[in-house]
Image (tube, coloured by chain):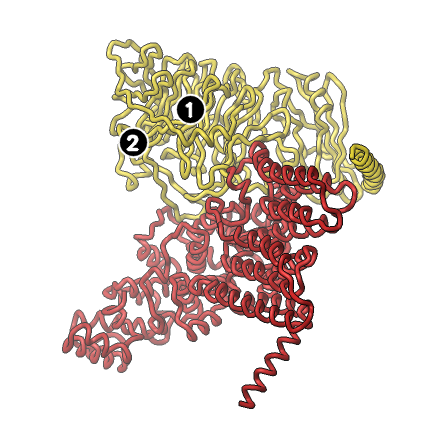
Amino acid sequence: MNRAVRTGRSFFLFMEFLNKYSKFLTPLFLGTGVFLFFYFYAPGLIFFREQNYLFLYTKEFFLDHVTHPGGMASYTGAFLTQFYAFTWSGALIQAALIVLVQQSISRLMKQAGVNYPYQILSLLPALLLWRFSCDQNYMTGSIVAILISLLCVLVMVEKRNKKGYVLRTFFLAIVLYMFAGASFILFLAFIIYFEVRNKEKPPKPYKLLIILTGGLLLAICLPLVSSFLFPYPLQQLYLGIGFYRYPNENFYFQYVAWVVILLIVILPARLAVKNKLPGHRVVYISILVFILFCGFLLLRKAVNPAMEEALEYDHMAWHQQWDTIIRKAGIKQPSTSMSMTCLNLALVKTGQSGDMLFNYFQNGTEGLIPEFGGDFTSPLTTAEVFFHMGLINEAQHYVFEAMEAIPNHRKSARCLKRLAQTNLINEQYGVAKKYLNLLQKTLFYRNWSHNASLENHPEWSILQTYRLTEERIFGSTNMLNILKDLTEKNADNKTAFQYLMAYTLLNKEWEKATEFFELGKQHYARIPWAYQQAMAFEWYQKARNLNQSQLELDQEIIQGLTEFMKTMSLTSEKQARAILEKPFGHTYWYYLYFIF
Amino acid sequence: MDIRIGITFISFFNLMKRIFQVSIILISLLHFTGCIPNTSTQIQSTAIPEIFPDYTYVTVPSTIAPLNFTPQDTSYTAVIAEFSGTRGNWFRVKGRKNITIPKNKWAELLKANKGDSISVSLKILKEDKWIQYTPFPIYISEHSIDHGLVYRLIAPGYELYSRMGIYQRDLQSYKQKTILVNTLFPETCMNCHSVNRGDPDFFNLHLRGSESGSIILKDGNMQVYDTKTPETLSNCVYPYWHPSGRFIAYSVNNTRQMFKMDPGQRIEVYDTASDIVVFDTKKNTLISSKHLTTNHFETFPAFSPDGNTLYFCVADYKNMPHDYKDVRYALCSIAFDPETATFGPKVDTLLNAPRIDKSLSFPRPSYNGNYLMFTLADYGTFPIWHKEADMGIMDLRTGEWCLMEGLNSTDVDSYHSWSSNSRWIVFSSRRGDGLYTRLYIASVDENGNTGKPFLLPQKYPATYYPQTLYSFNIPEFITSPVDVDMRKIEKKTARKTNMQWGGLKDNGAFNVPSGI
């Protein structure tokens, strides 16, 4: 009982502390929460944004953005997105933007005369934006657009009783439409509201009519007039250009945030709370609990874990963090093809594929060398595989396609970097120079581009020697032949050899295991486990007596296969699967019979 | 209220005036600090300067936009160019890095020296010494050029595409205006733009994707058609207008791509089947001939200037893609009667390219009827991906042909078209960097000889061309600006008209003079 009372009292004191210092604590907790969320829980979203929005310090890039409504917000968003190259700065920017929006709303609420405890409701739209930011295609520019509109409202509302207010507001609305696009609706709505509720200088009826009519006309006519000037669908001119990465899809949910912003400024102004405590305290705590509950509901499944995992793996593969990939997979098995592709690449690059291939759940060749997906993400992972084994043309192809697939027609620094590399390796120096010139117009890639040459990167010269140079056509159906030819062409290409063996095993073409191993056996002092398992199985199928095998098989392999096949012969498939899972779940034999 | 508005405007005006005054002072300061040093040390070089773009010895029309350029040697700190002619004034241009020619002075000089040449004298400042290069000429043709060009800008990609659009460019300036861009139609490909001998009042454009249809603008009327019929292989592509404006020849193709693995190669595009059809805009029907719808691969139709002959390419049927390297197209022709909308009884072979192990594409007759240009590659039907592709020209009066050595380069030289007076050609080439297609313009004299081609001028070519991620595609001359309302297209694509199949229209009684 005493403990319960003490706990309750502590909670009460804590709430009072929050209540007293909420002006500072609210943005602090919000910002910290957003930062930690994206830094630790969803860094993949940060990388993804930077990867798919190249920012160039050129006049053409600037003009390309600002010559349509909302362009300035998009440009600012793009400028900020370049800093998402680092997780900490990306998370910090996300936090800062959301906090700034929350603070703007809070000030607007104060301007509207909203009583103090209700101002914490400004967290609601902030939480919504936080939730939207978990959609990797919700653009940073959208938040910037909302922020610009709210800031303009704040500026104008403070001057609403000055001379020339109406005219200035009118021109600002037009400018704001060009700068922030469709979110200027927020500006118009607030301006009208604050005029209607102007207690200092109540507007005369005719002035109110002018403001209402003017606002309505601007809201309808500006996008309409824009349709004669800018080549965008009318719907986008009304709803916003560049707010969502897919121009053909309307992310209608984002407009919920706009409505919420309007409602939480307008509605609570009508609610009064007695100035005396505990009225304030009770209201504040109730709202805070409500908001925390909303936050929990909005954010608990905000991030798609499979997608986040894939993006993180892809990022690590791009930065060649092979050991980190393997460590991460050791903690939790990858769950997507894209993640598996990165893991398999890491195993190959660390020379462990032969031993550890079946230590992880493999789902066929789609987790090794995925087919072309036609999107702007998965081809990049496949391109990594191609690049490292010397299929330079194919790496170039997939990267180019991925960049062209970016739905909002933006470019990618990662893609340009890889294209520069592949063209240098292929001695297409003119094309490489173009991409390097563009990267020199960036902040974080210019140094790399200055040093990008075969002389400075001897590993690229090695990849040059790996390439297949005779004329032939690429097809995913002849991948095995391609891998075999790559392996035969250059005995040093251990990457290609490991992929040849992995592809053969995962495609269940075990009968070729021994033949193909001959092509790369010089890389090993002993035959790796997975290869031994396949070769043992191959021998077993032919001769039925492993002891007479001419291969240098470990006794453990011989015994294991013998036991495995004995179990298979004595029990039904379902029973065998259950029996064999624990002792043989990480073997090629188990994969052969029960997986995929 | 009126006084308040007036006061606001006056205040605004005063503010603008103040900003203007400050700007003038700032610009003057910058100009003063940016002055080119005056040094008398000069070295005479016997070499012609290497400049980008290479405008040395080119032949240009008198109305072309200024040919701004940059010396290739990037270690200089200043550059001066003097432009002079035997007639008219000379002028000098100075720059830190680029030569940016004043438009009016350029226009005056070219006009005064039409039919003659101007001389360009260049010197660069390097390590406090001026290096004076040997002056080079730019020849000014007496023949005029059309108003502008229409082309598509698209990334030189594989299967997917991001932004693309059809644009028109005024050749007297650097102005490029959008005709249509796929920001208006997301996830839509636009291609096959075509005009009738440069006349943009006859305009064809094809859309494919979320919005689809063939847009035909004719006599001020715009219609959008669904060009696929049950009787034809595909939508209509590769349009070519009949000089009367009544007919449009198309190809219908099953086109595929495959991707090459050898370094430096990328794509091979091939047809598994193709035929030729002609759209009669008067009857809204597609017609063809039994000679144009065989099992062989017929493609790339083009009408003769008198409208009585249809040129096209044809290749023997091959098992595709297995035999992709054996597909070679020849140049053929068939008679066409525009009065009865019927085809002649036989096909003539004008150039049997397969016999010389070559494949011919893009037959384009000159509008004076004297010549026909084409592209030759080692095989195939999509020469833009063939480095060896070169342009050739046939004298239609004699049947003789040759490669256009003065135009061709060591890289792809492909699609081409004639100006309305048949004195200029524009063509696509990848000679710049091997991938991103640029446009070159060259003069053609009455004997079919060409002048040195020049790169389409840009205001800042040294930054534009290296930075752009788009290729110029299918350039066509236009005699006046294209007047197409893109919003009208947006509305019309929702209400397409279906093309109807009009059948095979062969006229057995037609007597046609035999070909080469």
Residue B320 versus residue A200 in the image, above or below? above
Q: Nearer the viewer, residue B178 or A524?
A: B178
The residue beneath circle 2 is B233
Check whether the beta carbons of the residues at disc 1 and disc 2 lie within 8 A of each other. no
Is A294 rendered above or below residue A213?
below
The three-letter amino acid code for the residue at tag 2 is: Leu
| Mark 1, residue position | B223
Q: Nearer the viewer, residue A358 or B161?
A: B161
Q: Chain of mark 1?
A: B
Q: Position of residue A211 (x, y in %)?
A: 67, 40
Measuring from the top left, give residue B397's x and y in whole percent.
42, 13
Q: Secondary structure at mark 1?
A: strand
- Where, quadrant-wise, is the N terminus of chain B in this rendering? top right
Q: Is residue B131 visible?
A: yes
**Chain identifier of the red chain:** A
Callout 2 environment at 10 Å: few (<14), some (14 to 19), or many (20+)? Answer: some
Supply the letter of whichever chain is yellow. B
Going by the image, does B439 lie left or right of A63?
A: left
Residue shown at the point (57%, 57%) measured from the top left: A455
Q: The C terminus of chain B appears in which quarter of the rendering?
A: top left
Furthest residue toward bottom:
A2
On screen, A345 above or below B132?
Answer: below
Residue B429 visible: no
Report which quarter residue A523 is drawn in. Answer: bottom left
